[in-house]
Image: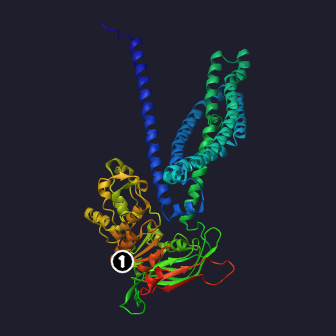
Amino acid sequence: MRNNSPSNFFTMSVALLVEFRFQFFVLRDYARETLSLRWRCWMTSYFMQRYLTHRTFYKIQSQSIIDNPDQRIVDDLSSFTSTALSFSLTLFNAAVDLISFSNILYTIYPPLFVVLLLYSIGGTAISIFLGKGLVTLNFLQEKKEADFRYGLVRVRENAESIAFYGGEDSELQLLLQRFTSAFENLTQLLISSRNLEFFTNGYRYLIQILPAAVVAPMYFSGKIEFGVINQSVSAFNHILGDISLIVYQFQAISAFSAAIDRLGEFDDVLDISRSKCLSDPMEHINLTYSFKKGSQVLDCNGSIPVNTSLRLLDVENLSLKTPKNNSTLVRDLSFAINEKDHLLVIGPSGSGKTSLLRALAGLWTTGKGKVTFYVENGGDAQSLTSSDMALVDVNSADMNEFGRPINGNSRSVFFLPQRPYMVLGTLRQQLLYPTWAGEAVVSDDTKFGGSLSFLTRPPNFENVGENRGVPIPTTDDLMQVLEDVRLGYILSRFRGLDSVYEWSSVLSLGEQQRLAFARMLLSKPKLALLDESTSALDEVNEAHLYEKTNAAGITYISIGHRRTLYAYHCRVLKISSADADSKQRNWNIESIDHDNLHNFLNL
């Protein structure tokens, strides 16, 4: 026979309430963590969009403005969102608790409430005094840990070069130095935390006896009952815990403050860059884009006039200086580039050849002069709004408002660095980068639903290939271009176009340079700027790539040192090292005499 006594019913009710409470706590924690994750997703997207627009990432790296932006985006953002949400909920609970128990304690014995306030204020002041260095130490610890991790990443990325040099011992010493710096700072952090913990433990111990000691005289005088003492101790502990959050959570607050400082510093840099004030000198190079126009040019052979050709580039009175120390590299440089007017740039190392390309790309603006690219009407211009279409000239600063500057690798202009950048992804993505980067195939595992729309591509980063009317290459196109640059064998070597490897490691520098030419041939720009882009290739492959580039109708400006490059260009720009005391120009442009080139190459 079942026992339905009231006591059993009461026991079951209590058990159900306890179970419900635990389930509520599980749901509460899940909701908090989910909210923290979604907040982090939004902030990560927000910071990365700002980091990768206006070339802020390049300015930060080249000018060493702040340390470890990657660590700030990954670790500091994660710490900020989780800790901020946790502290917010803690403060809310403390506020509710404080309101509930303050009236109880004040009703029991008002002087005890005053003692509580004085005790908490004194404890907070002492905690701040003892832990005032924790914020700085936590800030430095984040930096030193990130520096140590970055050193390990550099060893991984440059493993072959280090192995060739036999630089293991040197790398070990450098890594140990960085680890030692982090270790010493962490030691100081632990000492400060220990001193603060001594006080915190004493502070916690005193609150066990303080309220009883204050109320006890009233009990012995018969003014209150013994139960009131327990009630006052409970209310005292609740309220003191609520208003002593700084004392109890000081170490967590100091770490949180360090994360806020690092993110605040990063946010300030991004804001300054957005307002176009980041290291912008009073005098700068004016980079503009205009619709194409015709111009009479001479053939490469010398003086035979040909039909009207399209002007691609004008450089007028360009004086180029280094961003940091304003050292002059090039003075009053002026030249024009028309279709098929291939230019070779030569000069001693450090004379400013690569810096000239940086200025043409808009990476360096220190100096004065004007650089004008003539883009295709109906091509790049299509990315402008209808109101902008009426303009003949478009300043590069204005183009940045569209998220991706028109002077990037586009249908009109394409830049090839000496060491090509290998993206993370498949061989297909390597070939489509950067013109059709938005068409990269994303696996189902990395797709997000509509609820996280802020993680999808923002409007500023819409596919620019389609906007310019450039058709996306087919698989046959990709396979053919690999054959054109003599890389067809890597299809079987890496099992097709959709295999994923660490391409910068599995491909030699020469193969990477040929892959970069494949990108350019697919993009079909009107003008290409090549920074020693065949330096790792033999002369046969070099000649083959230049022939393919010329056959594709691409005009190019090359930087190089080999005499064999003369054969593929019409003119040569010779840059010499600038004399700081001289005001004379340090460059000279000459036509290349192809009739006597054979004798010149045999010198």
Q: How is the image coloured?
A: rainbow
Quarter in which the N terminus is drawn: top left
Q: Nearer the viewer, residue 84 or 548?
A: 548
* SS label for mark 1: helix
Q: Position of residue 426 (x, y in %)?
A: 35, 55
Read off the residue under disc 1.
550
Residue 230 place in picture, x, y as percent: 63, 20
Asked whether residue 412 is in view, the answer is yes
Locate residue 448, reporting x and y percent.
36, 50
Q: Mark 1 packing: few (<14 Cα in 10 Å), some, or many (20+)?
A: some
Please say if 478 is above or below 188: below
Q: Quadrant of residue 238?
A: top right
Count of labels in the image: 1
Amino acid type assigned to the residue bearing label 1 in the image: Asn
Residue in the image at 60% along x and 59% along y: 65
- Quarter of the rendering containing residue 425: bottom left
Which residue lies most toward the left here? 476
Quarter of image, res 472? bottom left
Q: Name the residue nearer the viewer: 474 or 396.
A: 474
Where 463 falls versus 4 (above or below)? below
Q: Is residue 345 left or right of residue 6?
A: right
Report if residue 104 is visible in the image.
Answer: no
- In the image, farthest residue toward the top: 1
Q: Is residue 519 left or right of residue 200?
A: left
Seen from the viewer's position, the closer of residues 548 and 29 is 548
- Residue 381, given in percent of the width and then of the height, sits at 39, 76
Say which of 88 and 68 sits in front.
Answer: 68
